[in-house]
Image (spheres, rainbow, N blue to C red):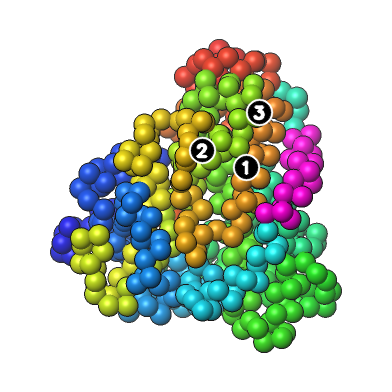
Amino acid sequence: MSPSSEPVELYGPEYERDPYPLYAALRERGPVHRVRFPSGECAWLVTGYEAAHRTLTDPRLGKHHSRGDAAWRARASLMPEPQHSPLQVHLLHQDPPRHTALRRLLTDAFAPQRVEALRPRFQQMAEALLDGLPESGEADLVEAFAARFPFQVLAEVIGLPAEFADRFDRDWGKVVQPVGPGDPGRPAYEARLRGLEQYIAGLVRHKRAEGGGDLLARLVAARDADRLGQEELDSMVFQLLVAGQEPVTHQITTALLTLLRHPAHLAELAARPELLPGAVEELLRYDSAFELTTWRFLAEDAELHGTRVPAGDAVLVSLSAAHRDGRQFPDADGLHFDRTPNPHLAFGHGIHSCPGATLTRIELQVAVGTLLRRLAGLRLTVPDPELEWTPAVRARGVGRLPVAYGGCPYTGAGANGPDAAC
């Protein structure tokens, strides 16, 4: 595709509901495509597994926003001007050596051995949430579970005080959704951002006075020792609070919806919980909540998988498109819990891979396993096409997941759940 070609639009109800036909068409045309987002911002999108894998470790591509050209900085869909910088210097927007130093501050808190030791505590949290539901009936699983469980886990892992956990407004997570300077939703967006900034400032003050050995207290101590700048501290707290929970909420919903659309697989997993580790990996591949990576930029004009990309233009990788590439994954559109190997990119790859990958895997295993065990006969109560998908540029998930459960065994039959007759 030449730079003058009309960009492909990556938005709209059909794309949000099912982007995979478009991704398949793009893969057939080549690995790099010019695309446009709801904000009007254009970028280069990498599709296909091999190209995605190579792009994620390409040393020519940097993440710092200063690499973007003036047009990108003016219309960037993530926190556009005038609030573009205060919360934007976290790990996802840093390059080595600063990225290396900042990431080192997080590794102990998310170390596999530490979070695995917390699995029993996470299980207690999941059970307690479901204890609040009747034995049978209807519920919105986002409100009742998927939006609450990841936040409770996160608070435990990073040391978020109970009074601040109670005050956190999930609506603040919408600051990562695209709202351009001329968008009519801009005032509400700015109000959310101001509220979140004030919340973070208060949290930092509290942790500074309280002290302790948890992750948040250690980050504040690093700031006081001049190992972190103030904007770096605020941005890392922001990243933990938003990126550390909202994608897990979305991944729980996409995993459940995938199972509801594949009732035989749902029935098998409910009957054989030992399949959970492999099933979670396949659910991550099949419909990843982290659909696109964040921006990358070339310092100078260069060839990217056969396409000339100008310096300062934004480059993104479609992880979801890579995951349905049949050249890497046989029967890529099929769901196979025993897929081996399964080198999906749901947590990224290279130096920017998610430091909380092990934690997220444990959360998904606990969440899916507990829901299937406790809510027998799980089934949608609305037609699949009526589900509303989040309009966020890079994330996949539904805002509500209305289900019924109870009084019906899993049979693996039915078009809208394990047994449509229940």
User: Hey, what amino acid is under mark 3?
Assistant: Pro
Q: Is residue 253 above or below residue 235?
A: above
Image label count: 3
Write down the region rendered in magenta.
112-132
Q: CA distance from mark 3 to mark 2?
A: 14 Å
Residue in the foreground of this view, choosing between 262 and 302: 302
Q: Nearer the viewer, mark 1 or mark 3?
A: 3
Q: Residue at x 64, y 39 (%)?
A: 365
Q: Which mark is residue 364?
A: 1
User: Hey, what amino acid is under mark 2?
Assistant: Leu
Question: In which quadrant of the rendered image does the N terminus lie?
Answer: bottom left
Residue 200 colored in magenta in the image: no
Q: Give x and y (percent) for residue 336.
A: 47, 30
Residue behind mark 3: 273
Q: Quadrant of residue 235?
A: bottom right
Residue 123 colored in magenta in the image: yes
| Label 1 vs 2, first from the N-terminus | 2
Residue in the foreground of this view, choosing between 67 and 340: 340
Q: CA distance from mark 1 to mark 2?
A: 10 Å
Q: Is residue 116 above or below residue 90?
A: above
Q: Residue furthest top?
A: 421
Q: CA distance from mark 1 to mark 3?
A: 13 Å
